[in-house]
């Protein structure tokens, strides 16, 4: 396809600046910022290994840390929303067609 098929948007609270830098370098985020222990990041590309990323991120987080990641596959037109609460990741699958219909969006 002629555009980036995978988009990832997220944040993680409770990181050190060094940890954030390591994640940015390893995963090649297209946009990112770090302030007061929170890393905000975006990625657009042809692939992103979300399971590997979540496993790596988990190594840096304590039990109270919060994080959220939206993984959007534009080819499949789906989104997985990962949230971390109470030391565990929860994944919710979202069909992007349903989102558009719910809010009466037309393209």
Image (cartoon, rainbow, N blue to C red):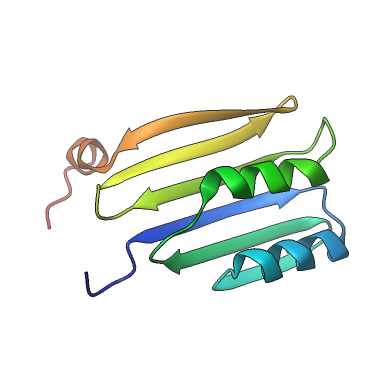
Across and down, in percent, residue 59 comes to 79, 43
> How many numbered marks, from 0 up?
0
Task: Say which quadrant the C terminus sits in.
Answer: bottom left
Q: Image check: 32 left or right of 106?
A: right
Where on the picture, by quarter, is residue 98? Answer: top left
Residue visible at 60% across and 47% down in the picture: 52
The residue nearer to you, when weighing 70 against 54, is 54
The residue nearer to you, when weighing 100 against 52, is 52
Residue visible at 57% across and 72% down in the picture: 31
Q: Image check: 52 left or right of 102?
A: right
Across and down, in percent, residue 64 comes to 82, 32
Across and down, in percent, residue 62 comes to 85, 36
Question: Is 66 above or below relative to 91?
Answer: below
Residue visible at 53% across and 48% down in the picture: 50
Toward the left, the furthest residue is 106
Across and down, in percent, residue 1 comes to 21, 69
Residue visible at 69% across and 71% down in the picture: 25
């Amino acid at each position: 396809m002629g555009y980036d098929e995978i988009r990832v948007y997220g944040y993680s609270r409770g990181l050190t600046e060094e940890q954030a830098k390591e994640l940015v370098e390893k995963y090649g985020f297209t946009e990112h910022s770090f302030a007061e222990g929170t890393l905000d990041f975006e990625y657009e590309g042809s692939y992103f290994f979300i399971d590997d990323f979540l496993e790596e991120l988990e190594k840096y987080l304590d039990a109270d840390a919060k994080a959220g990641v939206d993984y959007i596959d534009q080819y499949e037109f789906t989104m997985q929303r990962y949230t971390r609460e109470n030391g565990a990741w929860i994944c919710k699958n979202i069909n992007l067609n349903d989102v558009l219909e719910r809010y009466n969006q037309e393209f």
